[in-house]
Image (cartoon, rainbow, N blue to C red):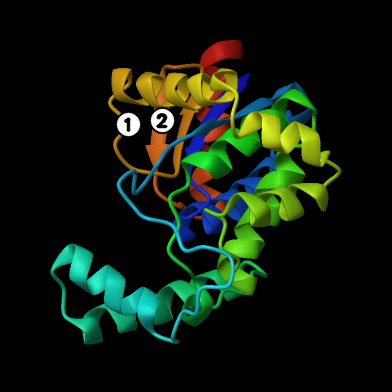
Amino acid sequence: MRVEIWSDVVCPWCYIGKRRFATALARFAHRDRVTVEWRSFELHPDAESARLGDIVEPGDYGRRLAAKNGSELAAVQQHLGLLTDAARAEGLDVHFERVQPANSFAAHRVLQLALAQGVHEAAMERLFSGFFTSGEAIGDAVVLERLAGDVGLAGDDVRRALSDELYADAVRADQALARELGIDAVPCFVIERRDGLRGAQHPEQLLELLELNWRAGHG
């Protein structure tokens, strides 16, 4: 059974959703028969990226989010508190006060390279933790190369991925498929292109989705 997951490494709910899906899959009786395919999605395609060495003041993330959405800062801060609690419940250490602005297109190109070299899961985890825990500027090529090196990707390969249109085209293809399927928010879990679930649902809901679709295909 094939599960496709559209996700973005600058999306906190995607980080939480990744962990929740792993929990659900571990509980699924037929997990050895499941193929998981992670697909690229840019949550903020027009975002600008901080560069290595830029100084980000604590609270900037909340202020940027409030400005972007036209929301009250107090409401955004309350939401980020709830997000932090939800992440902690999944064993994730999230610090929004450290998060730096990032356009994720380059990060997705590196993830496409990681997919080709069989270290995609590890690369996703490293970029998620770098962005949300350590406050890494993941829109910066030098930072991306260092983080990718942590999971075994060679610097030459990373630099090539950031300049080679092959990897850019792979990102665009994933996003075009998302539009074709009507996916406009992430995380989004799609099973056999016939059923889907949006948002960082709890493991119980994700497990139910897996079981229902397994029965539909093997009833």
Quarter of the figure with residue 152: top right
Give the structural element (helix, strand or loop) at label 1: loop
Task: Kindly identify the amino acid type of the residue bearing the numbered disc 1.
Answer: Ile
Per the rendering, the mark at residue 206 is none
Residue 165, position in %: x, y? 54, 20
Q: Nearer the viewer, residue 7 or 163?
A: 163
Q: Residues within 10 Å of mark 2 (few under 14, many from 20)?
A: some
Task: Tell me the crowding category of disc 1: few under 14, some 14 to 19, or many 20 or more residues within 10 angstroms, Cα based.
Answer: some
The residue mark sitting in front, 2 or 1, is 1
Give residue 188's position: percent from left, percent from top: 43, 38
Position of residue 158 relative to residue 14, above or below, is above
Callout 2, which amino acid?
Answer: Gly
* Lower position in the chain sequence, tag 2 or tag 1: 1
Inspect this view and state whether residue 5 appears.
yes
Q: Can you identify the residue that label 1 sits on?
A: 183
Contact check, label 2 and label 1, Cβ < 8 Å: yes
Which residue has dot 2 on it?
Answer: 196
Q: Quote the CA–CA distance across marks 2 and 1.
A: 10 Å
Name which residue lies at 65% across and 63% down.
Answer: 129
